[in-house]
Image: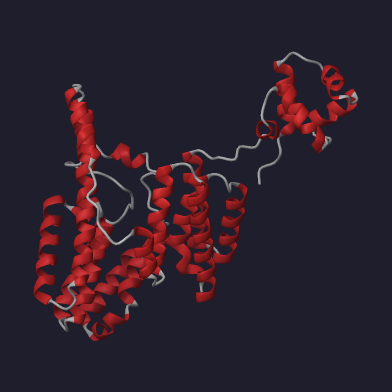
């Protein structure tokens, strides 16, 4: 909790109005010595004096106390990344308690609460036990409930609904996802192209290009995400699965997704390798895991959101994100996961006796591990 800064504010406001301590004392009905103590920090005004002081200086009680219930985007970003680093290095319970203190201090700062939800979603698996993980999940759901019921920013509320749906999926409650989001896919109007067209007609071609690039990029990432889902849904049809994988790889070749958004291709290759094991095709699984390794080692780091030579106008858009262009977890946590997801997955247990698989895992450990 920030220190109450009332003394400095009382001095500044009195000097702005060109008043003496005696003037303030006469208005408040106290001694000059009392005003002096308030301004030097020797004591605080009694609580019943606070509204009168705020009225006298024509400021709010929050301003009088030097308290701002909201944080700037940059302050939220700094808090998030600092806590993400703490989760990677320190005891989970200690960091979780620190999160709880920050949440209580800024309980009406809804942009912060939304990012704290995202932070906890990205790190709750570190809790160490099912009971502790459930405690974190309960905290997340309570925060999402508060955001939905109290926040007036529609965009924040919409994001909170999507995060809530993700939590239900992660915790095996698909029925609640349907209840929350509904069963039907409703066609939605795309306003981005209209905005781009408007800028074009105004003669602002650079802005029109920028908006169109952002729209294409978002649609491309959505396409990859949906094709990944379709890939996994065809775990009973190898022909369709392989056709989907081939199309994804052609998309990657055309747009260099492995460099533009390597996490997308990491997820594709991880899912494909597991599916090949399900189809009892370990040789193809190893080939896909090698591709996974190449992206993890060559393309993933530094782990920031960025454009490329084709998407050359989207970097400023990334920097304006709530968390900026940096990843939502620490680099160490990401590297650990990239290694462990292959090394410890039970679906790949049969591959551990194969020299080629052992070499891939060793390369991952050497390049991404602590050695």
Q: Residue furthest top?
A: 18
* Residue at the (66%, 30%) spot, across then down: 60
Indicate the quadrant where residue 253 lies: bottom left
Q: Left or right of 222: which side holds 244?
A: left
* Residue at the (47%, 61%) spot, across then down: 88
The figure's colour scheme reads secondary structure
| Residue 312 can be seen, yes or no | no
* Residue at the (45%, 68%) spot, across then down: 125
Q: Quadrant of the C terminus?
A: bottom left
Residue 327 location (% of width, % of height): 37, 52
Residue 316 location (% of width, % of height): 31, 37
Q: Nearer the viewer, residue 131 or 184?
A: 184
Indicate the quadrant where residue 270 lies: bottom left
Q: Nearer the viewer, residue 80 or 111?
A: 111
Query: In this figure, what is the number of numbered marks?
Result: 0
Q: Left or right of 324: which side holds 315?
A: left
Q: Nearer the viewer, residue 158 or 252?
A: 158
| Residue 46 can be seen, yes or no | yes
Q: Left or right of 343: which side holds 31?
A: right
Residue 342 location (% of width, % of height): 30, 73
* Residue at the (41%, 70%) spot, across then down: 171
Is residue 144 depicted above or below 283 in this figure? above
């Amino acid at each position: 909790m920030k220190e109450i800064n009332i003394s400095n504010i009382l001095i500044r406001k009195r000097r702005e109005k060109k008043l003496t301590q005696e003037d303030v004392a006469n208005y408040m009905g106290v001694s000059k010595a009392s005003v002096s103590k308030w301004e030097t920090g020797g004591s605080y005004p009694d609580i019943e004096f606070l509204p009168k002081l705020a009225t006298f200086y024509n400021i709010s009680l929050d301003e009088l106390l030097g308290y701002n219930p909201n944080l700037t985007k940059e302050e939220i970003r700094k808090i998030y990344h600092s806590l993400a680093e703490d989760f990677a290095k320190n005891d989970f319970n200690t960091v979780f308690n620190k999160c709880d203190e920050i949440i209580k201090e800024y309980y009406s700062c809804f942009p912060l609460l939304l990012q704290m939800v995202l932070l906890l979603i990205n790190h709750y698996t570190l809790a160490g036990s099912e009971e502790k993980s459930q405690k974190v999940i309960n905290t997340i759901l309570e925060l999402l409930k508060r955001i939905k019921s109290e926040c007036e920013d529609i965009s924040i509320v919409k994001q909170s609904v999507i995060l809530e749906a993700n939590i239900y999926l992660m915790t095996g409650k698909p029925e609640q996802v349907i209840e929350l989001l509904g069963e039907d896919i409703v066609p939605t109007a795309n306003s981005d192209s209209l905005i781009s067209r408007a800028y074009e007609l105004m003669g602002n071609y650079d802005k029109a290009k920028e908006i169109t690039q952002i729209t294409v990029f978002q649609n491309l990432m959505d396409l990859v995400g949906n094709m990944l889902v379709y890939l996994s849904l065809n775990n009973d049809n190898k022909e369709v699965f392989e056709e989907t994988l081939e199309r994804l790889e052609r998309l990657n070749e055309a747009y260099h997704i492995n460099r533009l958004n390597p996490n997308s291709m990491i997820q594709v290759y991880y899912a494909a390798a597991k599916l090949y094991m399900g189809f009892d095709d370990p040789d193809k699984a190893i080939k896909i895991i090698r591709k996974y390794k190449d992206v993890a080692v060559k393309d993933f780091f530094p782990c920031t959101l960025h454009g490329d030579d084709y998407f050359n106008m989207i970097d400023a858009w990334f920097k304006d994100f709530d968390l900026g262009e940096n990843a939502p977890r620490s680099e160490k946590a990401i590297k650990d996961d990239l290694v462990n997801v292959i090394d410890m997955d039970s679906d790949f247990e049969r591959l551990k006796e194969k020299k080629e698989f052992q070499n891939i895992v060793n390369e991952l450990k050497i390049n991404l591990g602590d050695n």
